[in-house]
């Protein structure tokens, strides 16, 4: 078997298990169909519903969102975190993106800190 498969052959137990499955259960190499919910639950309609729910009540949990729009918890989590870019902080959902006012305040504060670092005298002259 090493001559055929090379340096990394499967373990003997794995080979024996595969032989047993083919002997008693399977008849082909095709995978059996699985019954699970499709990933297509992340639709535009579902994505559009969630922000309104979060604006109404920021204390919602993923299970409540999933039950309200009849999708799986994984899909609801994907919508909230990846599509809407929202994170949970202190039991509330908060957007991770700064608003324009917050961004302006941040830039102004950084400029003021740079002025102060260059010299406190020049900093006070700038504001007075």
Image (cartoon, rainbow, N blue to C red):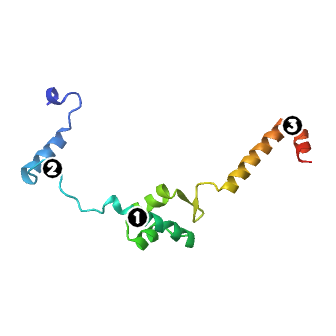
How far across and down, in percent of the image, does residue 115 sit?
82, 40
Nearest the viewer among 27 and 43 is 43
**Which residue in the structure is indicated by mark 3?**
119
Choose top left, top right, bottom left or bottom right for residue 42: bottom left
C-alpha distance separating marks 1 and 3: 54 Å
Q: Is residue 57 visible?
A: no
Whichever of labels 2 and 3 marks the residue nearer the N terminus, that label is: 2
How far across and down, in percent of the image, does residue 123 sit?
87, 42
Residue placed at 42% from the left, 62% from the top?
A: 44
- At label 3, counting other C-alpha atoms closer than 10 Å, the crowd grade (few under 14, some 14-19, many 20 or more) is few
How far across and down, in percent of the image, does residue 38 sit?
30, 61
Relative horizontal placement of residue 65, taking residue 6 as reference (left or right): right
Q: How many marks?
A: 3
**Which residue in the structure is indicated by mark 2?**
30
C-alpha distance separating marks 2 and 3: 73 Å
C-alpha distance separating marks 2 and 1: 29 Å
Whichever of labels 1 and 3 marks the residue nearer the N terminus, that label is: 1
Nearest the viewer among 95 and 100 is 100
Question: What is the secondary structure assignment of the residue under circle 2?
Answer: loop
Residue 34: assigned label: none
Relative horizontal placement of residue 22, taking residue 126 as reference (left or right): left
Question: The N terminus lies in which quarter of the figure?
Answer: top left
**Which residue in the structure is indicated by mark 1?**
73
């Amino acid at each position: 078997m090493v001559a055929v498969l090379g340096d990394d052959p499967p373990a003997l137990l794995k080979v024996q298990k595969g032989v047993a499955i083919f002997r008693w259960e399977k008849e082909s190499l095709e995978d059996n169909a699985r019954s699970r919910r499709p990933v297509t639950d992340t639709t535009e309609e579902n994505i559009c519903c969630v922000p309104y729910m979060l604006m109404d009540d920021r204390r919602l949990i993923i299970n409540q969102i999933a039950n309200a729009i009849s999708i799986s918890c994984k899909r609801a989590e994907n919508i909230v975190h990846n599509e809407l870019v929202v994170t949970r902080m202190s039991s509330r959902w908060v957007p991770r993106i700064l608003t324009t006012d917050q961004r302006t305040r941040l830039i102004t504060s950084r400029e003021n800190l740079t002025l102060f670092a260059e010299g406190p005298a020049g900093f006070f002259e700038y504001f007075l």
